[in-house]
Image (tube, rainbow, N blue to C red):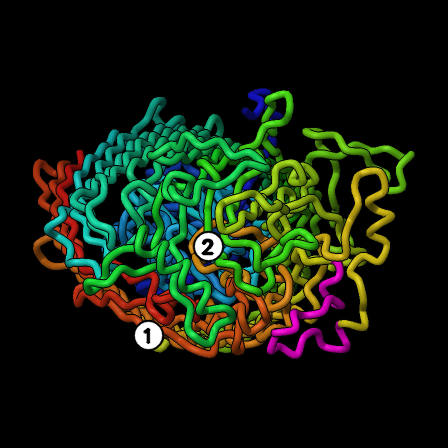
Amino acid sequence: MKSQQQTLHKHRLVDAVQTALTKPAKVSAVVLAGMLLCTPALAQQAGGIRGKVTTEQATGSVSGVTVVATSPVMPKPRTVHTREDGSFNLPLLIPGRYTLTITAADGSVQQMEVDVLLDQTSNVNVALQSQTGDIEVIQVVGSPFFAQQGNSSLSNSLGSDVVEALPVGQTFRDMLKIVPGVQYTENGTLGPSAGGSGAHNKYGFDGVDVSMPLFGNLASEPSTHDIEMVSMERGGAKAVGFNRSGGFAINTKSKSGTNEFKGSVEYKIENKNFAASREDGVEQDTDKTWITASVSGPLIEDQLFFYGSYYGPEEKGSNKVTAYGPTKAYKSDRDEYFGKLTWAPTDDLLLNLSYRDSDRVVTGGSIGEFETDSVSAGDQATQKIFTFDGSYILGDYTTLSFNINKFDYKTGGKPDVELGVVPELGASLDVANLDQMGYFNVPDLLADTEVDAASFNVGAQELINRYGYTENGVLTGGGGVGAYYQYNNQNFFRDSFELALDHEIIGNELVHSIHVGLKYSEAEEELSRFSNGWGSISYHGGRNVALDGSPAGLDPTSVYYIATTEQMSFVNESGQAVSAIHSFSESWNLEINDTIEHGDFTYNIGVLISKDTLYGQGLRANSANGSGWELAMGEKYKMYSVDWQDLIQPRLGIDWKYDGQNSVFANYASYNPEASSLARAASWDRNTQQSLKVYFDEDGNFLDSGAANGSSGKFFADNMKPHRIDEITLGTTRAITDRLQLRGHTRYRYGSHFWEDMPNNGRIAAYPASSQSPGVPAHIADKGLYIPDLADRYDGIGSPSGGTYVIAEIDDGQTKYWEVSLEAEYFGDRTYFNLSYVWSHYYGNFDQDNTTTNQDQNIFIGSSNYGDGPGRYSWDNKYGTLAGDKPHLLKAFGYYTTDWEANIGAYLVYQSGQPWENWDGAYYGYSSGTIRYSEPAGSRRSASHWQLDLSYNQNFTFADKYVLRFRADLFNVFDRQTGYRINPLVTSTTYGEPTEFYNPRRLQLSVGFDF
């Protein structure tokens, strides 16, 4: 277990620097409210208001005018006085709707309402005139979607009103579907693509980085009922918010209390009869329910607020039938509690403290379409998130903010059927009872043209007769029988600290908004993994084809069965098992940014510099050895460091407001994504905690064993440059009318310097004689070994072979992304509508999201199947269209508010299909076809997909403070269950068929009560 005496570090993550374009305010004879223009706010869970007071009177003064901002979400009002030129600044405001009260020297008072969104600053202009009657309140409503003056980034923001009015869903992931430019996905692990890998996105909840350490995927699923505002940045980042994302960055703000006691409760249901039949071949009756409840109010009026919530989703599956027949019931239960305090002890100091605790238990899961009931597994996950952040206004021009947070995510999975077989090297495999030895992958019959197909098919047919499933009256292979193959206990921890100082310098012609931020974070993974029986077992059938990772001298024609077994499953002579492996990473980040306003131009000059350090387990320093190390199982050591000078990420932008309202902008930004799995993948203790390949003959007799490819400790090649993405953006915004706004842009991204684990002799090793590939290009072969002195580096800790794996840069590795986008937004009195279209092309020779048959999982970044021998290198048909390429993406959504307190919402999406290509190991002389492309990447494409979602929300208000809510959400109205993630293995009986389908039409009904 992880020690409870953890050093608590401060952290503050705002992954999106948000701006928004709004419709111009209504103009009266008293107040002229300017456009709500958006400039990036500070790196806090906050927004701000900037403005300028003017007067038409020659003798009128605009200096010293009192501006007071009040809001239900702010415990205390914020008061400032205008400067000599009439300008004022209200930073570090909790996002929400504010009333500005402007009091002139003559006592006249004017008011306006302004929306402040997360990570954005709203600009308003006020024209002072003598008061002639009652105070008139002008409402300035912020657009949640558009970037405008002073900002050259591609940012979007939305509030709870938009989320609640549209057919979105219940989880954090569901909200991503309405963000322009982000692909629609129903993945449960891998994030959506938006110009980069789905594993390189960044996810923030109340500023806490909830991305999975080592893997980059989303680890948290907060309910949307808890989220008040969302901001997202998918390009053109400033050096504000520590955005190193290679994809997009998203941040959310949770709801807070107010001076008014409030509460709500909601019950939602999706009955088994509310959904259409699935196309994926799995028949199952599934009932889903969600219970959400919240309560908030003041503990100390005008000073201390509280907010608390509960989220309880439950899913039950029964009568499930696969190709093998009925299976056990499935159940998933989750209980999540959240509490938050907001305290303003003084007018200038604001503090937030929150804690989230979630527990989820699953039973009867992981049974696929072609698997038996016995392979089911259960899992449990607990998640705890603590955050403490604050902001302090040091004066009219300077603010200080901080964030401390702690993220713990513990998971455990186990087979529902636990086998009595204990694996032992040298022991035999009971081939007469393979379904009791582990998880047995029933073979498919080979095509007659395949190597040794005739002899292989004889044995395979016998196994199919015993373990196959019946399809159209014929026993068929390709399924899975036995028991789930693995026990997996995997825990993640991240502690962070962030500090930011912001200062404004007002000159005669220039205004400098200077931001300086410092962030430190450390992450850890604790892993113990055991096989159930022999683990996963496959049939080789004595084929004369190369075996991945097999020991030298092993004749492949003698091998009939191969088991993949975790080394932790074995014990030594003393009966001791291998201990858990701990992996660590540490990151320092310093950002400096200056936003310069000069007339109609706004310039951004910034830089983010970082230092990343990886720590492994299993070595201790020893200068007596040539390597400088000695073996020390369980001991932490410094593995690799990327210094400040290698992680310099410039951020440059310009915005020209050419006619006082509309703008043209340009931006250059560079990113070094920090997600990396190498702290574990290259850790030396992996030599004692490997995934082993165990080889058996036709009768199940033990032949030999060897480590699975890359499953070992590794050294790093010299002079590697860190993974980098360079980006150029050009765009424009335009207000067609006061209700219709447009934004268009084009963007180019170039990715380079990808790292992977590869055989040291990968550039010079010969391909099998039966390979049809031309092999290694001459200019790459001329480079020789990745680490020429590898033998010296191993002195005292081992003996490498030519094929020993090392960490190196991928030769000629690159990705390219082009994007052209047009977004339109319309505001009506009762109507809101948003339309976006993106044309894009994503191509190159390194595809992080296409390194295994199941892409929707946590896959090593820097140590995947890519580069694992012939057929898997950058020159092996890898250049082409990447899996995240979807040339056409159209989104349209909006809502209409009726006279009878109802909202009608709609969401429409159309996007191109997913690229794929043939995988064939025989093309390179191997039995395994995993990511061995026999044609250029992305040569084929699955069908395009579109769907329409609808919602209806009816409110009944009584006694002026109670609201009874009824809601219906209908997803995928036309039941468009488009297939995707095509099976590319040419030797599979299901080759060319979809392995996943978009979810069927389904109806959710809910009833809620607000008080």
Residue at (81, 66) in percent of width and height? 784
Q: Position of residue 779 (x, y in %)?
A: 77, 76
Residue at (56, 45) in percent of width and height? 694
Residue range highlighted in magenta: 760-780
Q: Nearer the viewer, residue 439 or 907?
A: 439
Q: Is residue 766 magenta?
A: yes
Say whether residue 568 is visible. Answer: yes
Q: Position of residue 714 (x, y in %)?
A: 72, 47
Residue at (62, 42) in percent of width and height? 680
Say whether residue 151 is visible. Answer: no
Sooner in the amino-acid sequence: mark 1 or mark 2: 2
Name the disc covering residue 161, or none: none
SS category of the residue bearing label 1:
loop
Residue holding disc 2: 539
Could you say which quadrant of the image residue 764 lies in? bottom right
890 up-or-down from 61: above or below:
below
Q: Nearer the viewer, residue 436 or 906?
A: 436
The CA distance from mark 1 to mark 2 is: 33 Å
Residue at (51, 55) in percent of width and height? 199
Residue holding disc 1: 943
Q: Nearer the viewer, residue 420 or 54?
A: 420
Classify mark 1: residues with Cα within 10 Å, few (<14), some (14-19) or many (20+): some
Image position of 6 (left or right of 484): right
Mark 1: amino acid: Ala
Q: Quadrant of the N terminus?
A: top right
